[in-house]
């Protein structure tokens, strides 16, 4: 089975891989990740697992090699392709790979679901629901870059919400400081421009 994981939500892709990885009988021998083409990929996907009935191969690129298409992939092998960028889809090898694989979409979550998740996580840090509701508009603005900037995924949001939670209370200053475009982050980005 070959699965192409598409969409902008990196965190959900990695979470799906992690769930499948946990089901393996031996995570060390039955799980491999590759960031570029290597003949070792063929050896791995064509052989049976040492322990268990299945194994996982994660490719962080689309293999543009004809040998990949002609490989005799072992039945229990699951190949997940998570490309950072799609290669030229006019190439015959790439076209054939895209035809053979299942496609799974991992798009950014809705604004309603994001806010519910932020609220639930803040409550888990002991911040009362009324206090969170009081700052709903500010929270929604603080995490709005999640929808406009590719660099932000759910993991970025989770980290920032946890920082707010560790602050112990919720107010405008905490939200501005730890939102996705907090002052420290803005200052850091500006410093990169001036270098």
Image (tube, rainbow, N blue to C red):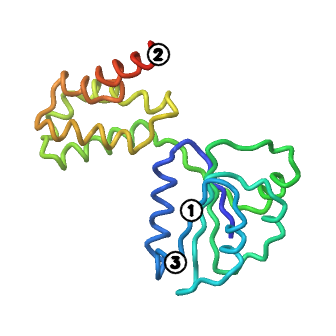
Residue at screen point 44% across, 12% down: 194
Q: Quadrant of the C terminus?
A: top left
Q: Quadrant of the N terminus?
A: bottom right
Residue at screen point 32% across, 43% down: 158
Q: Badge 1 is on which residue?
A: 33
Q: Which mark is residue 29?
A: 3
* Label located before the other in sequence (1 or 2): 1
Q: In the displayed structure, does residue 101 sit left or right of residue 96? A: left
Q: Is residue 154 above or below residue 35?
A: above
Query: Relative to the observer, which residue lies in front, 170 or 184?
Result: 184
Residue at screen point 48% across, 55% down: 14
Q: In the displayed structure, does residue 131 sit left or right of residue 25? A: left
**Counting other residues with Cα less than 10 Å from the Cα at mark 3, is it few (<14), some (14-19), or many (20 or more)?**
some
User: SS for tag 2?
Assistant: helix
CB of mark 1 within 8 Å of CB of mark 2?
A: no
| Distance between mark 1 and mark 3 Cα atoms | 12 Å
- Residue 103: x percent and y percent? 67, 56
- Residue 27: x percent and y percent? 46, 75
* Label located before the other in sequence (3 or 2): 3
Q: Which mark is residue 129?
A: none
Q: Badge 2 is on which residue?
A: 193
User: SS for tag 3?
Assistant: loop
CB of mark 3 within 8 Å of CB of mark 2?
A: no
Q: Is residue 27 above or below residue 17?
A: below
Indicate the quadrant where residue 34 lies.
bottom right
| Distance between mark 3 and mark 2 Cα atoms | 44 Å
User: SS for tag 1?
Assistant: strand
Query: Relative to the observer, which residue lies in front, 35 or 87?
Result: 35
| Distance between mark 1 and mark 2 Cα atoms | 34 Å
**Counting other residues with Cα less than 10 Å from the Cα at mark 2, is it few (<14), some (14-19), or many (20 or more)?**
few
């Amino acid at each position: 089975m070959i699965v192409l994981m598409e969409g902008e939500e990196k965190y959900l892709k990695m979470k799906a891989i992690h769930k499948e990885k946990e089901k393996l009988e031996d995570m060390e021998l039955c799980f491999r990740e590759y960031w570029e083409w290597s003949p070792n990929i063929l050896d791995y996907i064509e052989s049976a697992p040492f322990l268990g009935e299945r194994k996982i191969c994660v490719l962080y690129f689309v293999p543009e090699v004809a040998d990949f298409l002609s490989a005799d992939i072992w039945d229990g092998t699951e190949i997940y392709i998570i490309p950072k960028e799609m290669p030229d889809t006019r190439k015959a090898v790439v076209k054939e790979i895209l035809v053979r694989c299942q496609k799974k979409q991992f798009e950014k979550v809705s604004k309603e679901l994001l806010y519910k998740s932020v609220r639930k996580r803040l409550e888990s840090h002991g911040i009362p629901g009324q206090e969170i509701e009081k700052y709903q508009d500010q929270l929604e603005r603080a995490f709005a870059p999640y929808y406009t900037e590719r660099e932000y995924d759910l993991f970025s949001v989770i980290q920032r919400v946890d920082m707010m939670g560790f602050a112990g209370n919720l107010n405008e200053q905490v939200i501005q400081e730890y939102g996705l475009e907090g002052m420290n982050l803005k200052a850091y980005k500006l410093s990169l421009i001036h270098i």
